[in-house]
């Protein structure tokens, strides 16, 4: 029989195990499955925090933990039964990356394995005992690739696949074959627990009042950002009442840059804005709130019906029209304004390499093979956006990835193919004055280790004709 066994043990470890197993077994997303399990199991705040730390930490560091487990088990992790393997990953994470004492990490892991893969309990005991013979530093010294292979070494030490190490190095202007210290800082930032950012919707709640209400602090760059100290954002009354929403500060800056970019000629009121890739609706919500204040109207396009529904929920009560269609065909849509849009946002589907700190399993799921179909789609969407803008209107191309193929190369290719005459604007000038470390321009690149935001990329174009 292949029925799944219910894990025993303390509730925090049990929930963390269930979430990690669902991610690997069912391709689930941790940031969806874990909150659901926490709710269902009714964990105390303390247990919920521990389960989250175990689940997210284990998923993030999987590559490194697997190397340790393979060495301790004397066999590749692919040859360990999946339930026992996930329990051992959690055990190795506790032993090497938390303050859980070694004996407790061993005992609780064996207990967990006994309930999910009973035949492997003895094996798990032996493996965990070997894992706890060394501390984290000891394992790094034992298993780190030679220092001459800088990419492999950084990949192991910071638990990222090598292709992502090279991509970060290239985007940061370091040698992708021998990345330097800034690449190491960018990788390290992906392994830190990210702060939850809220966006105080303009016109609905004052950011200072929101910060007071949640015991948070104002954002460093976005005038609407509030950093949430602890706890689940769903518990924040302002979020449940639609006065604020959860949104990385970098994403807020993208929406703000679109709203403030110089169109020519400018219109005081009555502008038409287009969000071409709107789901699940974070930027559409901020754009909608800004549009309400300036008398503009937003059209939010999303191809996936369930995500279009999420956009509808996110923009309730705001001057936003949601259209479920393929953004590449938007010019054929009957609801388009004559002459075209004043401002168009292409928040393109991408690898998401700039938000790895918030999506713990993503780095191991994505691969370089994802790039060709994504970049084709990105070019086509940007082409459609340029056609949908009016002469003098602006198009902001954004990704939450710093990979040059999705950023610089996609923009250059779309420009080369465009039938319109275009000018590049300095995207850095559309961001808050004095914001440091945005790169050489005219595009702007944000980074977690520089700005505390996701690694959003922004390129700003204006149609001349
Ligand atoms: C990076 S996400 C956008 C995030 C969103 N702007 C926000 O702030 O919440 C990209 C979105 O583009 C959508 N998408 C993918 N292909 C599309 C297409 N051809 N036309 C319109 N939307 C598309 C995806 O379903 C996804 O929801």
Image (cartoon, helix red, strand yellow):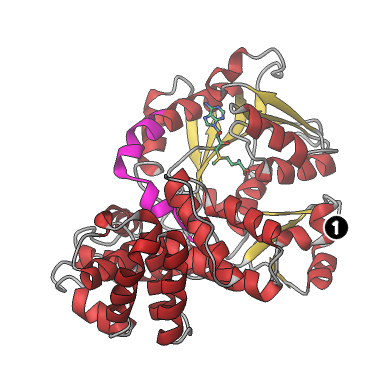
Q: Main secondary structure of the magenta part?
A: helix
Residue 305 sits inside the magenta stretch: no
Q: How many marks?
A: 1
- Quadrant into which the N terminus falls: top left
Q: Label 1 crowding class (10 Å Cα cut-off): few <14, some 14-19, many 20+?
A: some
Instruction: Specify whether 269 is left or right of 285.
Output: right
Residue 359 sits inside the magenta stretch: yes
Residue 266 in view here: no
* Furthest residue in direction front, as rendered: 1
Q: Residue at x 37, y 31 (%)?
A: 373
- Ligand 1 lies in quarter: top right
**Residue in the foreground of this view, choosing between 263 and 334:** 334
Instruction: Specify whether 81 is left or right of 101.
Output: left
- x%, y% of residue 335? 72, 17
Q: Quadrant of residue 465?
A: top right
Is 402 rendered above or below residue 332?
A: below
Is 102 rendered above or below residue 72?
A: below
**Residue in the foreground of this view, choosing between 221 and 377:** 377
Q: Secondary structure at mark 1?
A: loop
- x%, y% of residue 358? 53, 58
Q: What span is colored magenta in the figure?
A: 357-376
**Residue in the foreground of this view, choosing between 413 and 135:** 135
Instruction: Specify whether 231 is left or right of 208.
Output: left
Q: Residue at x 46, y 44 (%)?
A: 27
Instruction: Specify whether 377 is left or right of 388.
Output: left
- x%, y% of residue 70? 24, 66
Q: Which residue is mark 1?
A: 205
Residue 237 in view here: yes
Q: Residue at x 29, y 73 (%)?
A: 127
């Amino acid at each position: 029989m292949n029925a799944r066994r219910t894990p025993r043990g303390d509730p925090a470890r049990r929930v963390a195990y269930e979430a990690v197993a669902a991610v690997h077994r069912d391709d689930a997303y941790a940031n969806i499955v874990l909150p659901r399990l926490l709710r269902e199991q009714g964990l105390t705040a303390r247990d919920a925090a521990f389960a989250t730390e175990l689940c997210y930490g284990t998923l993030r560091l999987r590559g490194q933990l697997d190397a340790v487990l393979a060495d301790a088990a004397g066999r590749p992790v692919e040859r360990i039964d999946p339930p026992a393997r996930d329990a051992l990953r959690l055990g190795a994470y506790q032993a090497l990356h938390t303050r859980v004492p070694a004996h407790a990490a061993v005992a609780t892991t064996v207990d967990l394995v006994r309930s999910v893969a009973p035949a492997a309990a003895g094996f798990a005991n032996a493996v965990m005992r070997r894992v706890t013979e060394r501390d984290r530093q000891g394992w790094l010294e034992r298993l780190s690739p030679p220092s001459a292979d800088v990419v492999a070494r950084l990949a192991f030490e910071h638990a990222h696949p090598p292709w992502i190490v090279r991509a970060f190095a290239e985007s940061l202007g370091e040698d992708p074959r021998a990345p330097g210290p800034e690449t190491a800082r960018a990788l390290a930032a992906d392994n830190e627990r990210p702060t939850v950012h809220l966006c105080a919707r303009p016109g609905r709640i004052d950011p200072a009042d929101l910060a007071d209400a949640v015991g948070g602090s104002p954002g460093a760059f976005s005038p609407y950002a509030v950093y949430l100290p602890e706890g689940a954002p769903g518990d924040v009354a302002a979020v449940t009442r639609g006065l604020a929403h959860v949104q990385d500060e970098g994403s807020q800056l993208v929406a703000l840059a679109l709203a403030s970019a110089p169109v020519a000629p400018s219109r005081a009121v009555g502008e038409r804005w287009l969000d071409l890739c709107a789901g699940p609706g974070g930027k559409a919500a901020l754009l909608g709130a800004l549009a309400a204040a300036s008398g503009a109207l937003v059209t939010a396009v999303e191809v996936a019906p369930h995500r279009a529904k999420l956009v509808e929920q996110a923009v309730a009560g705001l001057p936003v029209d949601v259209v479920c269609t393929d953004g590449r065909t938007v010019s054929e849509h009957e609801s388009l304004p004559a002459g075209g849009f004043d401002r168009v946002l292409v928040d393109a589907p991408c690898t998401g390499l700039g938000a790895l700190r918030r999506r713990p399993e993503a780095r191991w799921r994505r691969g370089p093979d994802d790039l060709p179909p994504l970049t084709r789609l990105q070019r086509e969407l940007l082409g459609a956006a340029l056609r949908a803008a009016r002469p003098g209107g602006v198009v902001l191309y954004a990704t939450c990835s710093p990979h040059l193929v999705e950023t610089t190369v996609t923009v250059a290719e779309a420009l080369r193919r465009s039938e319109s005459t275009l000018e590049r604007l300095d995207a850095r000038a559309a961001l808050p004055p004095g914001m440091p470390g945005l790169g050489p321009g005219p595009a702007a690149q944000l980074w977690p280790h520089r700005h505390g935001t996701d690694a959003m990329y922004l390129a700003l174009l204006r149609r001349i004709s």
